[in-house]
Amino acid sequence: MTDTSIPSAEQSVDEETVPTAATGDGEPEAEAGAPKKAVGESELFGQSEIAADYIEGLLDILDYDGDIDELVSGGRPVVEVVGGRLQNLVGQRGATLEALQELARLAVFRQTGTPSRLLLDVGGYRATRRKELAAVAKNAVEKVKEHGEAVRLEPMSAFERKCVHDVVNAMSGVESESEGVEPNRRIIVRPAD
């Protein structure tokens, strides 16, 4: 069994990317003078394989059937689980899925010593949720443009906030930012200055 205890010095690797002054890509800044280590695709695929093995072990324990695919997409390791009777692994609004993703990331960290930006999807939940969130974001943008006032959205997970930020940032005349503290962190969409 894989040991997934949380390392004391480890910070959570969040999916929401907030640009930093030095890197601009949402990754933590490297220490002064230390070069930022590039992660190769083979290393990312290795991370997805570690996570897939961990998830497969959980499915066996839970006696769930599912096909597991490991891949690299958008410069990050991805594990997709497909099959019937997997809704319990998603949970209400993806809460269980988020927890499983963190456990898989911890399993990767324990084996590699490197934080992972692993993305876990079960039953296509994330793709479906992205479409729903795109509609929410477009609706908020329309309200902002129509009334000229900021729109405050409901609290969302880091994955959900990133989906909304991506849609809003692709539109002219509006901007978005996150406010608050987990689990009540939310997005505000407002007219661009």
Image (cartoon, helix red, strand yellow):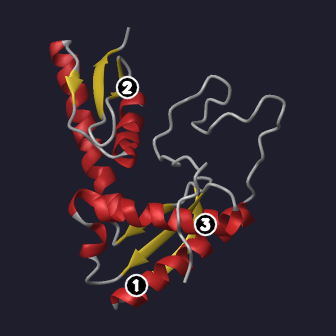
User: Residue type at mark 1?
Assistant: Leu
Q: Which residue is mark 1?
A: 59
Quadrant hosting residue 81: bottom left
Q: Which residue is mark 2?
A: 177
| Dot 3: element | helix
Distance between mark 1 and mark 3 Cα atoms: 17 Å
Q: In which quarter of the view is residue 161 placed?
A: top left
Q: Nearer the viewer, residue 107 or 186?
A: 107
Whichever of labels 1 and 3 marks the residue nearer the N terminus, that label is: 1
Nearest to the observer: residue 114 or residue 65: 114
**What's under tag 2, amino acid-wise?**
Glu
Q: Is residue 120 visible?
A: no
Image: 60 above or below 152: below
Rounded to the nearest angstrom, the CA distance separating label 1 from label 2 is 37 Å
Name the residue that disc number 3 marks.
108
Q: Are marks 1 and 3 in contact (CB under 8 Å)?
A: no
- Please state which of the two labelled residues, at mark 2 or mark 3, is closer to the viewer: 3
Which of label 1 and label 2 is nearer to you? 1
Q: Which residue: 35% across, 64% down? A: 97
Q: Secondary structure at mark 2?
A: strand
Residue 143 sits in quarter: top left
- 3 vs 176, left or right, is right
Mark 2: give few (<14), some (14-19) or many (20+) Cα within 10 Å: some
Label whose residue precedes the other's in the sequence (1 or 2): 1
Seen in the picture, residue 122 relative to 13 is either above or below; the reply is below
**Image coords of residue 190 (percent x, y):** 29, 18
Q: Quarter of the image containing the C terminus?
A: top left
Crowd around label 1: few <14 · some 14–19 · many ≥20 (10 Å): some
